Image (cartoon, rainbow, N blue to C red):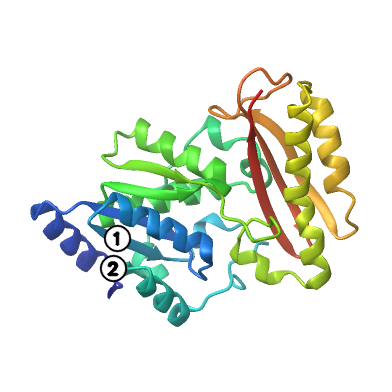
Amino acid sequence: MRVIDTIAEMQQQADQWRRDGVRIGFVPTMGFFHEGHLALMRHAGTLADKVVISIFVNPTQFGPNEDFESYPRDMDRDLAMARGVGVDVVFAPSVEEMYPEGFQTYVTVEEVTRPLCGASRPGHFRGVATVVAKLFHIVKPHVAVFGEKDYQQLLTIRRMVRDLAMDVQVVGHPIVREEDGLAMSSRNTYLCEEERREALLLSRSLEEAQRLVGKGERNGEAILAHVRRVLGAGPRVRIDYAELRDAETLGTVETLSRPALLALAAYVGKARLIDNTVLKP
């Protein structure tokens, strides 16, 4: 496994592979791997001849009071885990390499980024779209794999790729969960034992919503009211949002007549956790 830390070297490797007819798969990450990340890498390996991952904690997607400085990092551990699942190249640039002095060009995806995390984290998706666009130009993948836990991010990247005619296939991978149902996240390491138990209210509330829909409930506000009751039962849980949105456009949904995204974000202690499911009538 090769580790590359400069844009020029990564582009040279990508160009050589493309000249040789090699299909490139890509998984962008911020590191501190868990089984969810490894599942994305394995998935990419089934879709391509060579797998490239990036490890880059992107400062432009963090707000001024968020956890950029404290975000968990462990490069040696990450490299060992990536090697274990057959990754071919790790692209691990510095902030200065990705954002040189005077950097002033950003990518903004409009409507799909307005609700949910876009509303509660202003500027977040501008940072995401910008860094992913830049990584696509650097790594030059044929296919890129993203987790469906970050559902709004996945839709944002797909919209950007379509709108800007980028020659890359964007593939989603289902949410990977712990045995007890908690969606895997690097931020789960922030949770103490009591908070970890209460964090299960996110997945439990999604299961409750699925149960209601299975019994015939179609009223969006009734579904959300029940979800908020379940999610808000934990004294350490502070709901950021619980919303029902169209699964393709993220437009508002009042009545469940087509697939709808039930999206949650909540603070459990200092950890901001997200989760979702697609409800199908």
Question: Residue at point 8% right, 55% down?
Answer: 20
Observer-nearest of 215 and 133: 215
Q: Quadrant of residue 234?
A: bottom right
| Label 2 or label 1, whichever comes before in sequence order | 1
Mark 1 highlights which residue?
51
In the displayed orientation, state which residue is furthest to the bottom. Answer: 76
For label 1, count other residues whose C-alpha is less than 10 Å away and answer few (under 14), some (14-19) or many (20+).
Answer: many
Measured as percent of width and height from the top left, residue 12 is found at 16, 63
| 59 horizontally vs 92: left or right | right
Determine whether 100 is above or below 183 in the image. below
**Secondary element type, mark 2:** strand
Measured as percent of width and height from the top left, residue 52 is found at 31, 61
Question: Residue at point 39% right, 53% down?
Answer: 43
Instruction: Give residue 74's mark.
Output: none
Observer-nearest of 251 and 100: 251
Can I make out residue 59 in this image? yes
Mark 2 highlights which residue?
89
Amino acid at the residue labelled 2: Val
Determine whether 176 is above or below 70 in the image. above
Q: CA distance from mark 2 to mark 1?
A: 7 Å
Question: Residue at point 78% right, 73% down?
Answer: 192
Q: Are marks 2 and 1 in contact (CB under 8 Å)?
A: yes
Measured as percent of width and height from the top left, residue 48 is found at 26, 52
Can I make out residue 269 in this image? no
